[in-house]
Amino acid sequence: MMEFSLTQQFPAGVDRLWAVFSHPEYPQRKYRALGATAVRLLRFDVTKQVIEVELERDVPVDVAALPVWTRQLLARQQTLRHRSRWRRVSLRQISAELEITPVGLPLQARGGGNLVQTAPALTLMTLRWQVTSPMLLIGSKIERLFARQLRQALDADHAFTLQYLQRTV
């Protein structure tokens, strides 16, 4: 198992973030902007206390940029299945449970943590991720590779969200 933590800042309170996360257009725009060739919302349920989303997105894979030993495992396009559950814990806190699975690969990433509003227009998101693969011999290599790609994707996701927040003032 490969583990890592991530902390990101958002120049918005949790009410504003909740409002953004509550709209189906947000993940569709985000993943399209980040290079997905298709985004399918399988489930998008919103209440005052919980947001639950399940989606699949197709992303191109630059096989040439990957280690040689991975090229037989991957196609030029990969479908990623995302499940997320955001829950209002209090007026200034949201808990997050996230799961990302490359469809058809023995690999999974699970994240959990909190978004905590520390000032009227500042929220910190702290997540702890676990990447697991049951493959013998190369499982730990696959976990490290996917964890590195996941970190890069989460940074790109954060950058998109910062821009989205500025555009939707």
Image (cartoon, rainbow, N blue to C red):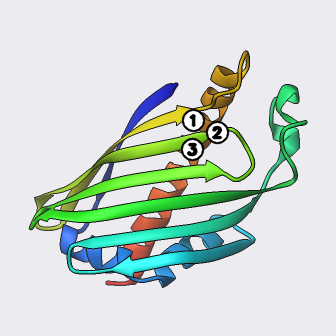
Q: Is residue 5 left or right of residue 135?
A: left
Residue 53 in percent (x, y) is at 45, 70
- Percent position (x, y) of residue 18? 27, 74
- The circle drawn on residue 147 is 1
Q: Residue at x 63, y 64 (%)?
A: 34
Q: Quadrant of the C terminus?
A: bottom left
> What amino acid does circle 1 point to?
Ala
Closer to viewer: mark 2 or mark 1: 2
Mark 2 highlights which residue?
107
Give, as a three-letter code, the residue at label 2: Leu
Among the two numbered marks 3 and 2 on one chain, the one whose residue lies closer to the N terminus = 2
What residue appears at the point 53 percent right and 35 percent down from the top-left corner? 131
* Residue 28 percent across, percent down from the top left: 57, 77
Question: Toward the viewer: 169 or 63?
Answer: 63
Vertical placement of 20 versus 80: above or below? below
Kindly identify which numbered label has been placed on residue 150: 3
